Structure formats: C-alpha cells, structure tokens
Amino acid sequence: MNRPEQLLERLDSIGQSLSKHEHALLLLGVGSVGTELERLDSYSDLDFFVFTEQGYSTGFIENLDWLNSVCPLSYHFRNTEDGCKIMFDDGIYGEFAVFDENKMTEVPCNGGRIIWSKPGYKHAIPSLDQRVSVDRPVTADFALNEAITNIYVGLCRFARGEKLSAKTFIETYAMNQLLSVLHLYLKEQPSRIDSYNNDRRIEQRYPDFAMHFDPMLQGYDRVPQSAIAIFSYIERIFPVNEKMSREIKDLAIRLGATLS
C-alpha cells in the first residue's frame, strides 16, 4: 500500500475509533487529506480536526487512547492548547487539534472534508465548503520598503558579528516580504495557494523567480551576498530611495559582497 492510501485508510480508522466515544461529534480531514486530495504524495502527512460535545475536548487531548487503539503512537508532543503533533509506530506523521463544539464558528475549516460524523449530527461549521481566500497586498509599497529596511538592519548585524540574526533578517524577513508581492509583478502559474504559508509551492507558482533562490539564499557566511541579490531584484521592480540604496550597497561591499 502506498503512502496516500495509508493516510486515507488511517484517517478512516481514526473515524471508526471516534465512533466508539459518545462525546465525539465530527472528524475533519484538512489540507492534502481534506478537499485537496490531488496533492497527496509519498511525503504527505495527516492533518485533522476533531470536534466534541461541549467540555470534552480536553479529555481527548490529554488521553490519546483513541489514537493508540488505531496504531500505537511512538511520539506525541502537545504543541498548542488544542493540538498535538504525533508519529505512529509505522512512521505516519500527523498534526491535529480537538475543539469543543462551540468553536466551530471560530476555527478556519475551509477545505475540510468530513471523514466521520456522529449519526444524526448536523455540524454548524459555516465555511466548510468555501475555498480559502488569501489576503494579498494590493500595492508593494509597504512590503518592499519593509524588505529594504530588513536588509539594512541585517547587514548592520552581520557587521557586528551577529551573523545568525543577520541571516534571519535578510534571508527570512526580507525574502518573505518580497515573496508576498510577487503576484503584482509576475504571472503566477496554476497551483493551490496555502492560506497560512505563502512560501508553500512557490517553486511551482513562480518557476522563473525560483531560479534566483541560489544567489538570494547563500547562507550563514554569505549573508551580504544574499542581501545584494535580493536588493538588486527589488531595485529592478521598485523605486528604491537613493540614500537607502547607497547605504545598503556600501555596507554590503565593505562586508565582502560584490555588485552584480
């Protein structure tokens, strides 16, 4: 049995296990085991939500017998008040959350797929069948000015020996700001957009831009070189303040970068 089949079978088995608990109401598969089944592959995992009668969600979080009865857990870690990250003995990894019924109007369940429901139960989730709408900047001004200042601060930190912080400011913060406005400059290829992580499937959505990742993400010892690559791209698409441009380039050059 391949991994996608294993995941779907495991989710069905979890639903069968929940059916034996009188206070369980609903099991939703989300992500690639929700309505996006075409994304399932050998590297997918389980993402699911469980809803319970009012006041019973904590019990399902604190006692995982309903999962161990399906397949023993080798690892579990309570990463939020409502959820856990888990791995079963057979190597299937998953993340889940359990909520009381009154949270149905608060939890983003868009793209969820009902795996199991208590017989006769009518869920009150308002957005289950709606596509996730992603808020995107309509102008680049904030994002790219934020990226520019991230680059400058990052170079200053690199100069004083704070290389790890510099890498975060430039290769993470500035890069993420640039990614957030690519849709304003480049044609986006058809691919599902993750409403929580904009860098998901970025290589498929913007294959031409992905060719810049090597020079833009050179790592711990070459942060100034990464900074120049990111900054040069920003200058090609956005009117950068002349003073900031001179300061960033001068500082990067002093730190060993060369202008392309």
Image (cartoon, rainbow, N blue to C red):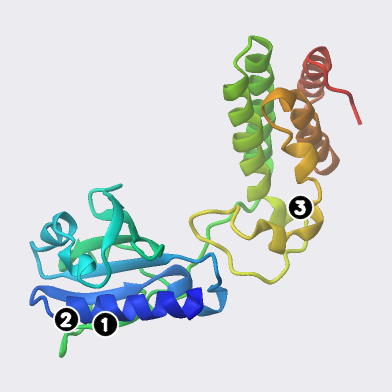
The amino acid sitting under disc 2 is: Ser
- The quadrant the C terminus occupies is top right
| Residue 25 image offset from top left, x and y in percent | 17, 76
Q: Amino acid at mark 1?
A: Trp
* x then y, percent, for residue 196: 48, 55
**Quarter of image, res 85:** bottom left
Marks 2 and 1 close (CB-CB < 8 Å) = yes
Residue on which the image places disc 1: 116
Q: Residue at point 40% right, 67% down?
A: 46
Q: Amino acid at mark 3?
A: Ala
In this rendered view, identify the residue nearer to me: 145 or 198: 198
Asked whether residue 126 is in view, the answer is no
User: What is the number of the mark on residue 19?
Assistant: 2
Q: Say which residue appears at 85% left-offset and 41% top-offset.
A: 236
In the rendered view, tell whether residue 197 sits above or below residue 68. above
Q: Which of pointers 2 and 1 lies earlier in the amino acid sequence? A: 2
Q: Name the side, left or right, on which 237 lies relative to 223.
A: right
Find residue 258 and report its image quarter. top right
